[in-house]
Image: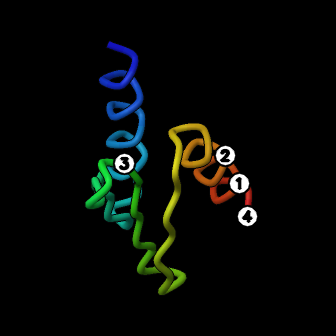
Amino acid sequence: MKLNHFWNAVVSRISSSGELQVNHRRDYQGNWSYQIYDPQAEKHNTFGTEQEVRMWLDQRHYD
């Protein structure tokens, strides 16, 4: 349920801005990462944890 709540928050942020593209990926070793493309900044960001994504989203909101 916690992950579902997290993704609802991410989708909410994306829907309101219409900008970000988020992918949740697993590498060949089974490690998950979050890859986010910000077309406004023309940057790809990769995060290893949900907390890192949340911090980045919060920082992006205030920039």
Q: CA distance from mark 2 to mark 3?
A: 18 Å
Residue 44 in percent (x, y) is at 46, 77
Residue ID at (39%, 63%): 35
Residue kind at label 2, given as amino acid type: Met
In the picture, measured across the screen, residue 25 lies left or right of residue 56, that is left
Q: CA distance from mark 3 to mark 4?
A: 27 Å
> From the viewer's perspective, is residue 63 above or below residue 14?
below
If the image is split into quadrants, where does the C terminus sit? Answer: bottom right
Residue kind at label 3, given as amino acid type: Trp
Residue ID at (33%, 31%): 8
Q: CA distance from mark 1 to mark 4?
A: 6 Å
In the picture, measured across the screen, residue 50 lies left or right of residue 4, that is right
Residue ID at (52%, 56%): 47
Residue 63's label in the rendered image is 4
Q: Earlier in the sequence, mark 2 or mark 3?
A: 3
- State if disc 1 and disc 2 touch (CB < 8 Å): yes
Residue 32's label in the rendered image is 3
Q: Earlier in the sequence, mark 3 or mark 4?
A: 3
Marks 3 and 4: which is nearer the front? 3
Number of on-image labels: 4
Residue kind at label 1, given as amino acid type: Gln
Residue 21 in percent (x, y) is at 32, 64
Farthest residue to the top: give it.
1
Marks 1 and 3: which is nearer the front? 3
Identify the secondary structure beneath mark 2: helix
Q: CA distance from mark 4 to mark 2?
A: 12 Å
Residue 12 in percent (x, y) is at 36, 39
User: Which residue is denoted by mark 2 in the rendering?
Assistant: 55
The one nearer the camera, 16 or 9, is: 9
Q: CA distance from mark 1 to mark 3?
A: 22 Å
If the image is split into quadrants, where does the N terminus sit? Answer: top left
